[in-house]
Amino acid sequence: MEGHPLALHDVMFIPALVAQASDEQNKKWLRRAQRREIVGCYAQTELGHGSNLRKLETTATYDVSTQEFVLHTPQITSLKWWPGGLGKSSNYAVVVANMIVKEKHLGPHSFLVQLRDEITHQSLKGITVGDIGPKLSFNAIDNGFLGFDNYRIPRTNLLMRHSRVEPDGTYVKPPHAKINYSAMVRVRSHMATGQGNFLAQALTIAVRYSTVRRQGFIESGEQEVKVLDYQTQQHRLFPSIAKAYAFTFAGYETIRLYEQLLKEVDTGNVSLMADLHALTSGLKSVVTHQTAQGIEQARMACGGHGYSQASYISEIFGVAVGGCTYEGENMVMLLQLARYLVKSVEQIKAGESGKLGPLVAYLAVKVDGVDLEKGVEEYMKAFQHVSRLQTWKASEKFLKLLKSGEKREVAWNKSSVELTRASRLHTRLYIAETFKRSVQEVADPRLKEVLTDLLHLHVNYELLDMATYALEDGFLSSSQLDYVRDQLYFYLAKIRPNAVSLVDSWEFSDMQLRSVLGRRDGNVYENLVAWAKASPLNKTDVLPSVEKYLKPMMNSKL
Ligand SMILES: CCCCCCCCCCCCCCCC(=O)SCCNC(=O)CCNC(=O)[C@H](O)C(C)(C)COP(=O)(O)OP(=O)(O)OC[C@H]1O[C@@H](n2cnc3c(N)ncnc32)[C@H](O)[C@@H]1OP(=O)(O)O
Ligand SMILES: Cc1cc2nc3c(=O)[nH]c(=O)nc-3n(C[C@H](O)[C@H](O)[C@H](O)COP(=O)(O)OP(=O)(O)OC[C@H]3O[C@@H](n4cnc5c(N)ncnc54)[C@H](O)[C@@H]3O)c2cc1C
């Protein structure tokens, strides 16, 4: 959980080679990387820039006389900063640098760069490398810094699957300007399942513990109740159980789409790139944000013991919340999706709605109202409505500002909060749709029934959460919202008997969870006492600090 020094080797280094190195290059590098003869990381972010990749300062200047690239970090802000596994573990890196050929700046490109000697592991001449220090979490990963002092690498270390520099310096452009960003798109495609997994771990701990913990009464005179029987506790935890499933289903779809994209790109078809970029940008942002919120609620649902490291939820939170920042800061990524949504609105306004992709086609179709009692399909129409409403509102705001003479970037900035709202609603619609489709495909009827309950819980929770938008234009009435509330409470109670099975079905072992509260056997109290006794502070009865500080104070007559 605390991360692994080789995580980025598998998560980004190898995938970057697979997607961006040519077959010939991979004959040299890929097998060695897969056998871990060489260990690598993905070095892109710099001290001064992470989001705005066009302003990366590390340069790779082609020297035609020696057929080498010269890597250089001209100032302190150009140092690579943050890459996982860079500080101490990796001897190679995929380095993203601004490529300069014949004095022409050609933008960020990826290079395979050796950082350390393969035998001694010492850093090579011209390389400055080290660890960036402790972080909120993930402290088993050596996130690092890296500087280059006119460090030379062969021309053939430019990853050349999609673009090339010939020996004479002729540049062959890639089929899509952003194709070098593929390693990021891959991780974003995987993040919904990854984050769903973090959320699931925290929920397993909180739900199990909530059946052990007894506190207070629902009906007087009886035994104290398991806290999971409180409606407020169920409301805190069960919608997140639904989300953990929903994120996993959505993630399976984006992983499949990424695999498809890789195949299509190899045949020269890059049409899926814009769609997948928009989709994963939004999904990554919504999922990480909701996961962090869900984990924090799970921690609070464990009361005081949730605050102890014995719960392990704080560590899960620390790791998961990093996802809001890495692979693209959430606001920045929501704004990437918003570009796509605004473009779609512009297409509709230009009478070209037939050209819209399947995920945005609903933006062109107006619905006057819904009958929620007819079931989930009607909820989907309601989600479409609120997303459409907000997308049009935000887009119109932006387009109006443009028309009034504002510069594009200024108009964009002035509309950006509204635009991020549209992106979130669009993404939540996507999550609900994939959840619905995935549950429909489940073959086992008993499993399908339980998952359908979770789906109902999810759509009612979500609709209530975004009700302001639907009330604003009178699309939903207050009596319809009362119906949604009733349904929500109905499904909380219906899910209660299956709650433990729903979390147990994720099959986390005690070793994975590392939580005293979330133990499978439920022996929480005995083990909390044993855990506390093992605290380093309990090794001796009287601490040295008592002699040094407390006693002089306690014995003073002042
Ligand atoms: C197996 C996994 C498990 C995972 C679960 C467990 C994980 C356990 C370990 C985790 C470990 C942490 C791993 C962290 C690893 C890092 O964090 S690596 C560093 C990640 N860095 C980032 O994500 C940086 C974010 N910034 C960016 O991606 C880009 O700068 C931005 C924001 C997209 C802007 O790029 P830009 O070049 O300035 O482009 P911009 O002018 O905004 O857009 C131009 C056009 O390009 C398009 N475009 C931009 N990007 C793309 C793209 N990628 N594709 C297609 N089109 C694109 C735009 O849509 C736009 O299109 P139009 O609207 O013009 O049609
Ligand atoms: C745990 C962890 C692991 C990481 N691993 C790696 C790795 O392996 N390799 C690697 O290369 N990098 C890695 N990173 C770096 C990470 O990808 C960047 O930190 C991330 O992309 C955010 O960039 P930034 O730090 O420049 O944030 P900034 O862009 O400086 O963000 C600061 C604030 O500015 C806002 N902002 C920035 N631009 C805009 C805009 N255009 N519009 C509106 N608001 C904006 C953001 O929303 C945010 O609120 C890692 C980071 C973390 C935390």
Image (cartoon, rainbow, N blue to C red):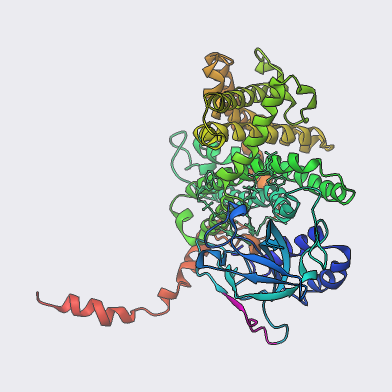
Residue 371 visible at all: yes
Q: Name the one closer to the observer, 511 or 245.
A: 245
Which region shows up in magenta?
A: 120-129
x%, y% of residue 71? 65, 70
Q: How many marks?
A: 0
Question: Residue at coordinates 51% horizontally, 61% vertically from top-left?
Answer: 310
Q: Main secondary structure of the magenta part?
A: loop
Q: Name the one closer to the observer, 36 or 117.
A: 117
Q: Quadrant of residue 73?
A: bottom right
- The furthest residue to the bottom: 120
404 on left or right of 375: left
* Quadrant of the rendering where the N terminus is positioned: bottom right
x%, y% of residue 184? 69, 53
x%, y% of residue 495? 64, 35
362 on left or right of 492: right
Q: Name the one closer to the observer, 190 or 344.
A: 344
170 on left or right of 207: right
Question: Residue at coordinates 80% horizontally, 44% vertically from top-left?
Answer: 257
Q: Is residue 130 above or below residue 505?
A: below
Q: Quadrant of residue 487?
A: top right
